Amino acid sequence: MDNFIVHSLLLISLLLLLYGAARVFYSIWWKPRRLARRLNLQGIKGTPYRPLIGDMKELVKLISEAWSKPINLNHQIVQRVDPFTLNNVQKYGKISICWSGTRPRLIIKDTELMKEVLSNKQGHFSKPPLNPLILILTRGLTTLEGEKWATRRRLINPAFHLERLKEMLPAFSTSCSMMIERWKNMASPQGTGDMDVWPELQNLTSDVISRAAFGSSYEDGKRIFELQRELIVLVIEAMQTLYIPGFRFIPTKKNQRRKKLNSKIKSMVRNVIERKEHTMSIGQSKVDDLIGLLLQSNKDNQMTTEDVIEECRQFYLAGQETTSSWLTWTLIVLAMHPDWQEKAREEVLQICGKNEPNFEDITHFKIITMILYEVLRLYPPVIALYQHTNNETKIGDISLPAGVDVTLPFLLNNHDPELWGDDVEEFKPERFSEGVSKASKDQLAFFPFGWGPRTCIGQNFATMEAKMTLATILQHFSFRLSPSYIHAPYTVMTLQPQHGAHITLHGLQVVS
C-alpha cells in the first residue's frame, strides 16, 4: 500500500512537471512561433524571434547610442528619439514585425490602417498587458476597456465640453500670471535672464490642473500633485529596471515609499471629494471644477468615490506632462525661428493688446494655432500609441490573430516626406493655414490627439491652455536659445528635452 502511494505521488509530480514544462514551451516557443508564422505567411517581415528577451537588447543598444550625444539645431529628430522603430521600418517596410519579449509587435506605419485600429468598436483591440507598476499611478479612463470604458467616458464627457472649459479659464489665467511675475523677478535689472523653461512649464501645467481639478481646494490639490509627481519618478525608475513578477510586494525602501505615497494621495483626494459632496448638497459650492463636474455627472452613482479619485489622478497624469512637453518644444522652436515668434506676437498684440487673453481672443488666434499644430507634428509629446489584439480581427487585407501587440508610430508618420513633402523636416506652420485636413498630402494623416472613439478627452482643455500660455508669454517676453542649450529630445513617458530647455528671455515694454 505504501509503495502504491509513493508511486502515485511520483506520477502526479511527474505529470505536474510535464504540464509545467509544456506550458513554458508553449509560452516561450510554440505560441510566439505560431503567431509569427501567421504574419509571415501574409508577406509581413521583421526581426527573428529571440526567446524571452525579444528585441530588448537591440532596442536598448540603439537608444543608448542615440541618447548619448545631442543633435544639430534642426528638426530631424526621429533617428535620435526612436531609432529602433525607424530602423525596423526602413529594413522591413511600413508593416513590419518586432518582438516585445515573447509577444510579436506589429508596427503599422500606414495612416489608413492606423485609423482602422483606432476606430475599432468591436473590442478587438485593447491596451497591451500593463506593467502592474503603471496601475499604481492611475486606474482611470485610459486603463479601462469595453463597457466599463464606454460608461466612464460617457460620465466624464460633460466635464470637458467647451462651455464648461470656459469656466476654468480664470484658473489658466491665474497660473499664467503667477509664472510671468516669477520670470520677471528672476530676470536681471535689464529684464534679461537665462532660464530652463522645462521645469517652469511643468510647474505651470501642474498648477493649472490643481486649480481646474480642485477649485477652492487648490492648496490641497497642489500638495496631492506634488506627491503624485514623486510617485511618478519612483515608478519610472522601477520600470527602467528588469521587471520581476512579485518584486513590488517585497518591502524594500522604495517599494514601501511607493505604497505610502499611493495611500496618502488616495486619502487626501477622498477628503477633498467628501468635502465637495457636502458643500454641493447644502448649496454652498459652485460646480466650477473637475471634481464638482464629476460628482454632478455621477447622479446615478455609477462611479464610486474610488473611481472619482482615479479620474483625478488620471487627469494629472495625462494632462500635466503632455501639455508641458508641448509648450516647452513650442518655446524652443520659436526661439530657433524668431521670424515666426514675431508673427505670433504681432497677432497676440493685435487681438489682445495689453489685456489677458479671454475665450473670445483664443478662438481668433490663427498664427498661434498654426504654430502649435506644426510643433505637435515635429515634436509630438506622445510619439506612438500601443494596442493589443484581444480577438482575431482584420485591418485592411491583414488578418491579425489574438495576442499580437500593435505599434502606431505617430512620430515616424509626422516626419514622412511621402505624407508631408520634401520639406517635411522644416518648421512651416503655414502647412496648417487651411486646417488639419489639408495640411498633408494624405487627408487626415495627422491625429496628435488620437482618432475615433478614443480621441483624447482632454484635447480642448490642453489646446486652450497651450494657446493662453503661449499668448501670455509672447505679450511679456521675447526669447532666444541660450548658449548653454543642448538639442537632445528623448522620451520618458513623453517627448522631453534631455538636458533641459535653456532659453534667454528679454522682457518687453508694457504693450499698448
Image (spheres, rainbow, N blue to C red):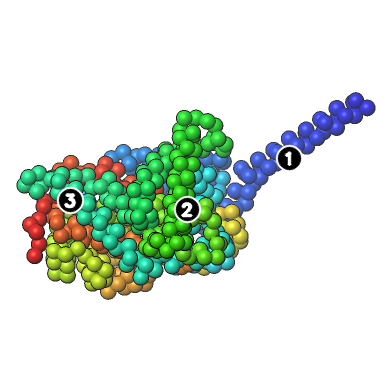
C-alpha separation, residue under disc 2 versus residue under disc 3: 34 Å
Give the labeled residue for mark 3.
181
Residue sitting at the far front: 282
The answer to whether mark 1 and mark 3 are in CB contact below 8 A is no
Q: Which is nearer the eye, 389 or 142? A: 142
User: What residue sits 39% from the left and 46% below the top?
Assistant: 224
The part of the image, by quadrant, that contains residue 208 is bottom left
Identify the image quadrant of the N terminus: top right
Q: Can residue 62 be seen in this view?
A: no
Q: Which residue lies furthest to the left in this view?
A: 190
Viewer-nearest of discs 2 and 3:
2
- The answer to whether residue 342 is above or below residue 16 is below
Residue drawn 9% across the image and 59% down it: 510
Residue drawn at x 46%, y 57% as measured from the top left: 278
Label 2: how many residues lie within 10 Å, few (<14), some (14-19) or many (20+)? few
Tell me whether circle 2 and circle 3 mark residues in contact (CB < 8 Å): no
Cα separation, mark 1 vs mark 3, equals 68 Å
Q: Which mark is residue 274?
A: 2
Percent from the top left, x then y, of residue 336? 18, 54
Q: x and y percent of residue 427 in the render?
A: 23, 60
For disc 1, the marked residue is 19
